[in-house]
Image (cartoon, helix red, strand yellow):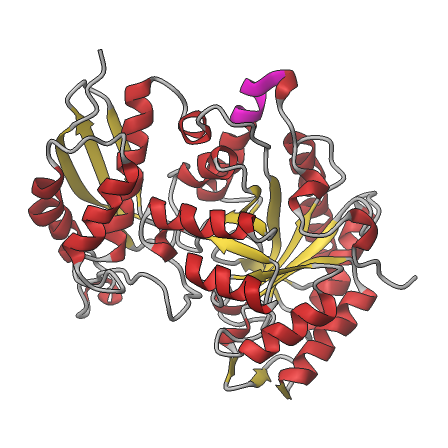
Amino acid sequence: MTDARIARLHGRRVWDSRGRPTVEVEVHLVDGAVGRAIAPAGASTGLGEALDLRDGGTRFGGFDVHRAVGSVNAEIAPALVDLDTTDQETVDRLLVDLDGTPDRSRLGGNAIVATSMAVLHATAASAGVPLWQHLAGGRPVRIPLPEIQIFGGGAHADRRVDVQDFMVVCPAARSFSEALDWTAEIYRAAGALMRKAGKAQGVADEGGFWPAFGANEEALETLALAIESAGFAPATQVGISLDVAASQFGNGGRYALALDHRILDTTALVDMLGGWMEDYPILSVEDPVGEDDHEGMLEFTRRYGHRCQVVGDDYLVTNAKRVEAAAAGGAANAVLVKPNQAGTVTEAFQALRAGKDAGFGTIVSARSGETEDVTIAHLSVGWDAGQLKVGSFTRSERMAKWNEVLRIEESLGESAEFSGWSAFPFTATQASTPKP
């Protein structure tokens, strides 16, 4: 007989994909079940995010996490002992109340999210089911459409290009497995084009090529050519997804594109992105303007939201109230969901549910600083998010997530349903089709 009460809880210091310390939490239940999870860390962060607790000083550039691990072992562990983990919302509310700050800065967002996710894993283990199945609770689910980086830029690649992510999506694939096959061919084709042009300079934080392009649009040209070189039809089979991350190069409605030697106002930036959509098979645009540029987000969504996915990341920061306000006002039509951005699993789910209620696209996302932790792979399936954004198609901290979804798809057999075009808040016939 299961007993899902917490017997003990332990935090430890481990390492992420950037070689920085991070927090792992391990939860042991009375019935012997164990859950474990690791906090990721972002480089491009929104102002409303839960804050990691770092040690400061000179050691590891100030990024050490002894204080956050101390929060787990000295305060969180004793407060959670004997708590029933089957009520995730109660556990997460206790964590939020225990911290007592609006941004999780006292105990640390890294300490809190690792604990929240570890509790979730322990509950599934106690029930004897995979995490995604525990989350689904018997409801139908889809296997998510992967959104995969080919070129990295912005804060992920020392600002080699201004736009942060140049990604591909394969909505016409018949399965998650086939979508990965197509992406692998495109990644190989992009690498060959880069090497031939002498543009390859290594890899960015999330595993995509670190390019030496002369202009932001050159990345789009190369990516579109890679799609065609790999034998796929742009827009109808494979599309481009951009994470502009405009907050990283803009403020107060002024945007400085260093690579293009241009300073644009909001309208000029929206016009530029719209021009790209006319010329390239762009199906999704994330944070097209800065997080402080509400009018810009309204303008971009009004002009292009009927034909592409307009994603709020820094703009919405995995916050249900912000999602509801954006939906009511007509800003964005999709939400990026990052558990550590919200602070707890419950808050992340509330943001995703708000997006679904509004008819938004919903995307569960990794961070640039990642680990072997595969929690988000299960969240994307169990919550029927429809889309999963992990990074590129290299580096084990990325491939661990893609491979976990492959296992889930295989376990579902013939009943597995791939989200494909249904993941988007527009139809295939509305999609942006480039000019010939």
Q: Is residue 326 magenta?
A: no
Write the residue at 62% across / 79% down.
259
Q: Nearer the viewer, residue 299 or 30?
A: 299
Residue 391 visible, this angle:
no
**99 to 295, vertically: above or below:** above
Write the residue at 57% across / 25% down.
409
Q: Residue furthest front?
A: 328
On the image, which quarter does residue 97 sit in?
A: bottom left
Residue extent of the magenta highlight: 407-413
Q: Nearer the viewer, residue 407 or 105?
A: 105
Q: Is residue 58 left or right of residue 231?
A: left
Q: Residue furthest right?
A: 436
Residue 43, horizontal then vertical, whole percent: 41, 63
Q: Quadrant of the N terminus?
A: top left
Residue 220, horizontal then vertical, whole percent: 73, 64
From the image, give the main secondary structure of the stretch colored magenta: helix
Write the residue at 36% across / 63% down.
49
Residue 281, horizontal then vertical, whole percent: 78, 58
Q: Quadrant of the C terminus?
A: bottom right
